[in-house]
Amino acid sequence: MSDLSHLREIDQVLSGRAIGRDALVEQSWRRCVEQYGMDPAKPSPAHIVTEARLREHREQSERLIAIARSGLEALFRQIAGQKYVLLLADAKGVTVDYFGDPKFEDELRQAGLFLGSDWSESLAGTCGVGSCIITREAVTIHQSDHFDLTHTPLSCTAAPIFDTAGNLTAVLDISLLRSPRPKISQSLALNLVKASVRRVEMANLMAINRGDWVLRFSTSPEFLDVDPEAAVALDGSGRIIGMTHGAEAVLARQMGGRMGGAVIGERIDRFFNLTIDSLPDLMRGRPTEDRLIQLRDGQAMFGHAIAPQSERAPALARGDLAGPLQSIGGADPHIRRLQAEAARLAPTAIALLVQGETGTGKERLARAVHISQSGSRPFVTLAGATPSEGWPALVEAAGGGTLFLDEPGDLSAAGQARLLRLLAACDALPAQRRPRLISATAHDLAAQVRAGGFRADLFFRLAPVTLTLPPLRLRQDFDWLLDRMLRQMGHLRPDSLRLSPAARAELKARDWPGNLRELANTLEVAIALAEGSVIDLPDLPPAPLSAPEAPQEHLADILAACGGNMSLAARRLGVNRSTILRRARREGLTGP
């Protein structure tokens, strides 16, 4: 078939399915054909990204996922009985969080309504998430509105989530595998998703701007204190430093409709008949109906001012650590220093050596440094096990990005020499094509150099700066890491999970030779074993490298000899008390 005939055939398909399409859908369909070269007559399978890519997308969206999750859980409880699926996609269209009925998991995955699905318009055609990203508006793409035939049974309603600077940062989508025919049947879904997005943006603004004045405002006083329509954050001089999208829409009208972050940096008195000194009069102590404020165009609204909650954080913590480096750890002094140092080094081309025990998160830190650099650049891994013939191709692929050297300490003398020659060749590349080197090792390379096991000239190329990650057993932010991992694994269970105090204490008492990787594995098993919403001691698998537990056949006798005292029985057997309790519960030696 000639190209002209094929285009005519596509045009016939477009015309045949055009009935009822609105202008937004029509424009999207034309883009799919003319810009992306798609064929509406050929269905394609759902696009699910690899585990590695999904991990990258989730890490970059981790902060938003944590803020949004409780609200999304509440929303899913409202819609779960109606067979809806809830997706949170990032600004590139990749689903980074998901709520759906496990009974339909296979069907949902096949339809792309699943974690890791890529709904960007260039891949999936006209769809809820993709169209929302393009238009930056809430949309419903219903059944035959979808470009790809695979998706025509679906009804997808999506709304954009903006960050506090006015940039599109995510999309919230409610979808049905099969829905009633009329598109108007999804009006409730549209209202629900827009309301949820407003609350997510509000929670994000409040979390980021705890140390600043926040002015929340609504057209009605009834919901002002509990569910306001919009909010802005203000610095000490009354300039706007953050906003929700609803606030930008209201205030941009005072600037001739200019959106795109134009409101940021403007003084609040340009929009309202008030100043920063007026805010204390708008605090919660006064009745809401008395907190009347007026826009410069005369429109009346009601205001609720919230005073700064704490001292303003240092500029580095508020700015440079607001991205992926912030997800490395919590309130641990060593981690805080490491984050600050990594943030300052991230924009440079200086080679870094990340050192730490196995499982401490070395690659995660390397990726965080990489992502912290502006622009979209490749991240390419060169492992010691990779045949050396392929090394030059990897260097070429990493051009302008990051070349991640995984465990150079395992290289033989010949391998070290080849790597040194390869790095020397990199110096001859143009600056814009020269990859930045980040290495990761569980070895003490400096000690190996002193012992003659590692080349000094290679070591000095790899390690102008060494960033050392502490083992999990020495970290003071264990609770933060534990809670963060539970949130990350929330997609494994539709209900919200928490740890019992006893289970948390048991996890904190372990040595964790496998560090973060071992902790993640332990939690994944515990989530699978937990029957309710609480993970308790019996749900925790034993530590893989711990001493063998007491033989089951003797436990009852030992407990009897100890008068039922589990601590005494644990000391006699040389194990943790939690181990005895777990075995006793398993054998029915304790009460329910």
Image (cartoon, grey):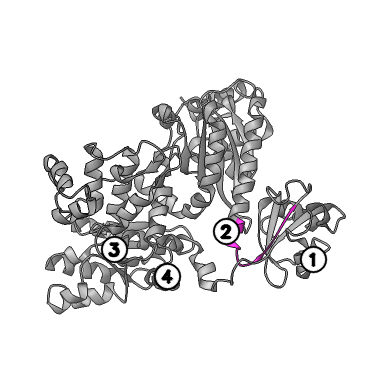
Looking at marks 2 and 3 on the same chain, the residue that comes earlier in the sequence is marked by 2
Residue hosting label 3: 473
Q: Disc 1 marks which amino acid?
A: Asp
Q: Quadrant of residue 195?
A: top right
Tell which of 265 and 212 is nearer to you: 212
| Residue 564 can be seen in this image | yes
Q: Tags 3 and 1 in contact by the CB under 8 Å rule? A: no
Q: Position of residue 148 (x, y in %)?
A: 51, 29
Q: Disc 3 marks which amino acid?
A: Arg
| Range of magenta residues | 205-217
Q: Tags 2 and 3 in contact by the CB under 8 Å rule? A: no
Q: Position of residue 190 (x, y in %)?
A: 64, 35
Tell me the residue at 23%/59% (across/down): 513
Q: Disc 4 marks which amino acid?
A: Arg
Looking at marks 1 and 4 on the same chain, the residue that comes earlier in the sequence is marked by 1
Tell me the residue at 14%/48% (across/down): 561
Residue hosting label 1: 269
Residue hosting label 2: 207
